[in-house]
């Protein structure tokens, strides 16, 4: 159970950091498109509504991303593992319910991540119940070093922190690069905008702006992509 818990921990923290930084840099939810602004509200899909809802507020998107990032950070150390797993369950339960409620196609994956958080809490389940529910005294958990020899412990710490620096650098640099290439800081086309068509000529005949006309253009949209 301990080795399985450790494997779950590593996968979990990587995923949380990846998802978290994609929200912190506001990359996960696509920018409100000009076509979305013109589309009648009733034609939106449940997922489209939720995506635009999240996109509308950068502050809430960043907050949700930071929640995932902190959950991933707390999972990096055994002393904060329980706190990280509790964070994970809370954050991913919210994500899972949003995916189920708005028909977003990552339902199983988000559910798996939530249950992985619960799995990490199994070994400390009794202590958590005693502390949070039964109001009983809880003895501090003794955390033993992985290696007895000092040299091995120092080497393991060096490797661990090198790995932490690497995953943080890769996630942050990747999210920042995505923001510049296709995110909110990406350049827009020169003709970006919504244009009202004032005059439309068809076979040398100027068509009047009738809403019933299926040939005449009403608007010209040059969107980001």
Image: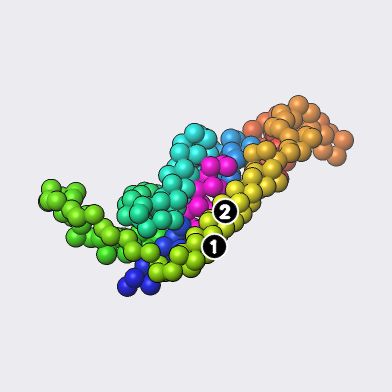
Q: Which residue is mark 2?
A: 165
Please say if the residues under marks 2 and 1 sit with CB atoms less than 8 Å apart: no
Figure check: 83 above or below 211? below
Figure check: 60 above or below 177? above
Q: How far apart are the two marked residues, 2 and 1, measured between alpha carbons?
A: 10 Å
Q: Is residue 47 left or right of residue 194?
A: left
Q: Position of residue 138 (x, y in %)?
A: 18, 53
Element on which disc 1 rests: helix
Q: Nearer the viewer, residue 61 or 205?
A: 61
111 in magenta: no
Q: Position of residue 56 (x, y in %)?
A: 52, 35
Q: Nearer the viewer, residue 180 or 162?
A: 162
Residue range corresponding to the magenta coloring: 14-26
Q: Seen from this angle, which residue lies furthest right?
A: 204
Q: Is residue 119 left or right of residue 36?
A: left
Q: Position of residue 25 (x, y in %)?
A: 58, 42
């Amino acid at each position: 159970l301990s080795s399985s818990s450790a494997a779950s921990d590593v996968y979990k923290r990587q995923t949380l950091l990846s998802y978290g930084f994609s929200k912190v840099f506001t990359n996960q939810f696509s920018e409100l498109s000009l076509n979305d602004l013109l589309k009648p509200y009733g034609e939106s899909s449940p997922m489209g509504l939720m995506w635009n809802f999240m996109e509308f507020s950068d502050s809430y998107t960043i907050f949700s991303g930071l929640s995932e990032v902190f959950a991933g950070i707390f999972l990096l150390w055994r002393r904060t593992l329980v706190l990280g797993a509790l964070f994970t369950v809370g954050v991913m339960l919210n994500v899972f319910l949003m995916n189920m409620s708005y028909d977003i196609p990552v339902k199983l994956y988000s559910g798996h991540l939530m249950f992985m958080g619960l799995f990490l809490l199994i070994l400390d389940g009794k202590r958590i119940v005693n502390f949070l529910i039964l109001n009983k005294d809880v003895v501090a958990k003794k955390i033993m070093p992985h290696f007895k020899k000092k040299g091995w412990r120092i080497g393991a710490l060096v490797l661990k922190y090198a790995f932490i620096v690497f995953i943080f650098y890769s996630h942050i640099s990747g999210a920042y690069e995505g923001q510049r290439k296709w995110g909110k800081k990406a350049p827009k086309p020169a003709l970006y905008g919504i244009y009202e068509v004032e005059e439309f000529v068809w076979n040398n005949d100027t068509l009047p702006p009738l809403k019933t006309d299926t040939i005449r253009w009403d608007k010209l949209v040059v969107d980001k992509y």
